[in-house]
Image (cartoon, rainbow, N blue to C red):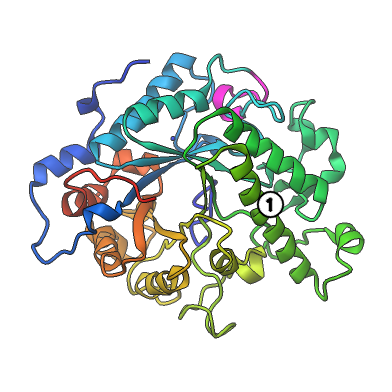
């Protein structure tokens, strides 16, 4: 997705909010900045304003493994308070980063990011606390799960002995320096759904959220060795690629159906890599020349999920600047708007806040106004119902004031979420 959590091309008492507001302080210092011509979404439609809080490898939270329960909770509350201060209305908290859990799961061990030891009870319930405290602040809590990633290494012996991947070694494949559950096995698809829906059954989450990891991103010179599963289950498909896409389709469709059975009103959203297919590959594709296409490389037919209405919202990761040759934000935004038009599926745009001010990024990302211009463009597409920013660490640091600029230009009052 974003570093570690996705590819870049590739969430006690509240702390004093004033001490937390790096971006908020900058907004106050700048004062009014919204030009009079800037269009606003109509108040009655709602607008999603979200932030991803990544837990894998302690990317955003907790700031380090092994903190006390009180310290972890205080950091979590700080992220929620900061979201409120910046007039956001949703947090997307990663609760199943690597086939483990940030709640007392009936299926999988406690996440390593909490204590530094997979399977060790952290002494509190992070997901339960997050849901309660988010709702108390008027924030939605979208529970972010990674269906198939087992570990960011390839040594099963490093997993806790009770881990399902060790109990069922035939479910697991190494690839690209990581371990994955094999999406081609029906028993795997059933298990990962059970593991995720355990959280939905226990907590009043507002949405189930997935990112861009389905089949893994291609790694040069390596093979995802699912030949045996293809031989057993793929006889009705002309190619392995078609079989793999059907496996992913089944996971999406079945999960959508089961969410409704487990808890009424919980939405299902997916945040894929931003390019379905390039137009040079498929006339229905976008005017891009991206090196990755979700349909072909991740075996994820994201456009189909929208057209079939299997999901409630899609949040494509449009992690490129306006004018970027291979994948221009200004070309991808209207493509996605057209894709969702008339489907009833919500469209929220994933924004690469982490690129703002990064000297390794193109010059456009050194301009604090780049992200604000993204929201300007989106205001001209009524299908675009909001934005989600990656990620919480950058929301806090905001090194060049890009988030502060977004807030000053677009989030001067609070907004309800769309439904």
Point 23% across, 26% down: residue:
17
Q: Is residue 237 above or below residue 254?
A: below
Q: Which residue is mark 1?
A: 254
Extent of the magenta region: 112-120
Residue 214 location in percent, x, y?
A: 65, 55
Q: Is residue 99 above or below residue 412?
A: above
The residue closer to the viewer here, 287 or 410, is: 410
> Quadrant of residue 321 in the image?
bottom left
Q: Is residue 197 above or below residue 245?
A: above
Q: Secondary structure at mark 1?
A: helix
Would you call the spot at circle 1 few (<14 residues within 10 Å), some (14-19), or many (20 or more)?
A: some
On the rendered structure, is 150 left or right of 204? right
Q: Can see residue 68?
A: no
Q: Is residue 115 magenta?
A: yes
> Quadrant of residue 318 in the image?
bottom left
Point 91% across, 63% down: residue:
231
């Amino acid at each position: 997705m974003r570093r570690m959590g996705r590819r870049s091309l590739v969430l006690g008492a509240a702390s004093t909010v004033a001490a937390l507001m790096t971006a908020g302080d900058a907004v106050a210092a700048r004062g009014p900045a919204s030009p009079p011509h800037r269009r606003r979404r109509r108040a009655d439609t709602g607008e999603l304003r979200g932030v991803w809080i990544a837990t894998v490898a302690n990317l955003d939270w907790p700031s380090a493994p092994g903190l006390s329960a009180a310290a972890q909770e205080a950091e979590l509350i700080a992220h929620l308070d900061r979201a409120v201060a910046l007039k956001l209305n949703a947090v997307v908290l990663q609760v199943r980063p690597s086939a483990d859990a940030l709640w007392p799961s009936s299926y999988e061990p406690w996440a390593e990011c909490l204590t530094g030891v997979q399977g060790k009870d952290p002494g509190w319930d992070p997901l339960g606390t997050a849901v309660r405290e988010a709702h108390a602040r008027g924030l939605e809590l979208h529970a972010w799960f990674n269906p198939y990633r087992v570990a960011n290494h390839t040594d099963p012996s490093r997993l806790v002995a009770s881990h399902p991947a060790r109990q069922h070694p035939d479910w697991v494949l190494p690839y690209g320096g990581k371990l994955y559950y094999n999406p081609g096995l029906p028993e795997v698809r059933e298990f990962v759904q059970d593991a995720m829906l355990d959280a939905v059954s226990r907590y009043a989450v507002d949405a189930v959220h997935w990112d861009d990891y389905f089949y893994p991103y291609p790694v040069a010179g390596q093979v995802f060795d699912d030949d045996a599963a293809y031989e057993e289950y793929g006889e009705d498909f002309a190619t392995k690629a078609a079989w793999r896409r059907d496996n992913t389709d089944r996971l999406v469709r079945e999960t959508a159906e089961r969410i409704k059975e487990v808890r009424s009103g919980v939405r299902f959203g997916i945040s894929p890599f931003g390019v379905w297919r390039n137009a040079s590959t498929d006339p229905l594709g976008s005017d891009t020349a991206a090196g990755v296409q979700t349909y072909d490389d991740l075996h994820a037919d994201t456009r189909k999920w929208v057209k079939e209405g299997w999901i409630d919202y899609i949040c494509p990761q449009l992690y490129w600047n306006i004018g970027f040759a291979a994948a221009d934000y200004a070309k991808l935004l209207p493509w996605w708007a057209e894709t969702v038009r008339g489907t009833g599926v919500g469209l929220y745009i994933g924004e690469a806040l982490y690129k703002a001010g990064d000297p390794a990024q193109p010059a456009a990302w050194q301009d604090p106004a780049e992200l604000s211009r993204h929201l300007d463009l989106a205001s001209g597409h009524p299908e675009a119902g909001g934005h989600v920013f990656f990620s919480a660490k950058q929301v806090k640091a905001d090194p060049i004031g890009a988030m502060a600029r977004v807030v000053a230009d677009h989030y001067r009052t609070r907004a309800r979420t769309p439904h």
